[in-house]
Amino acid sequence: MKKYYLLLSIIALLISSCEKDDFCIEPVTPNMIIRFYNATNITQTKPVTDLSVYSEGFDELYTNANLDSILIPLDVTSNQIIYNLSSESNLDVITINYDIEEVFVSRSCGFKAIFNNVSISSDISNDWIIGLTETLENTITIPTIDNETAAHVKIFH
């Protein structure tokens, strides 16, 4: 009988010492969502033809794409990233500045970055980007980027 108690005790100890498997299934650090709009009809999206997007030091994100919205990552090791957006051989540069706040998500996901005080400016030197707001200004500020549920930036072209 003592053998059974000892065996049951060992089994109970082994079962109770197992850890629950955690898998990170939710996106952690959000990307910035950019949506492209028609500059003459500001409520209508307008795909960009032959869109290429890249940042120096990183892989090219899009090449010869025809899209009306894109997702771009922000650099979590710096407070600024500069993206080159070209369309049909016209190049515009957008500069994104932000503060990074690290937030603990879970043991399996670790930390995620939330981007606060996001400032975006465009070099609209008569290329294809006309503005970043409905009034066609070339600078905008976003309080925070903490999810990917809606577009963060509108680019009018």
Image: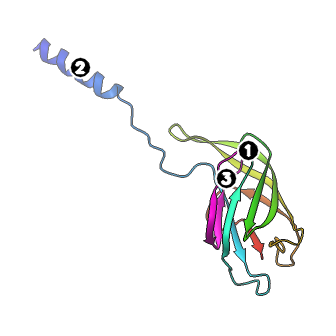
User: Which mark is nearer the camera, 1 or 3?
Assistant: 3
Write the residue at 69% across / 59% down: 53
Does residue 33 sit above or below 17 in this rendering?
below
- The kind of residue tagged 1 is Glu
Where is residue 67? Give x, y as percent.
Answer: 62, 72
- Earlier-in-chain disc, 1 versus 3: 3
Q: Quadrant of residue 86?
A: bottom right
Q: Quadrant of the C terminus?
A: bottom right
Residue 73 tag number: 3
Where is residue 50? Give x, y as percent.
Answer: 66, 70
Q: Quadrant of the N terminus?
A: top left
Write the residue at 64% across / 54% down: 30
- The kind of residue tagged 3 is Pro
Name the secondary structure under disc 3.
loop
Where is residue 149? Give x, y as percent.
Answer: 61, 65
- Earlier-in-chain disc, 1 versus 2: 2
Give whichever of 37, 123 is nearer the camera: 123
Graded by Cα atoms within 10 Å as few (under 14), some (14 to 19) or many (20 or more), the crowding at tag 2 reads few
Mark 1 sits on what residue?
101
- Earlier-in-chain disc, 2 versus 3: 2
- The kind of residue tagged 2 is Ser
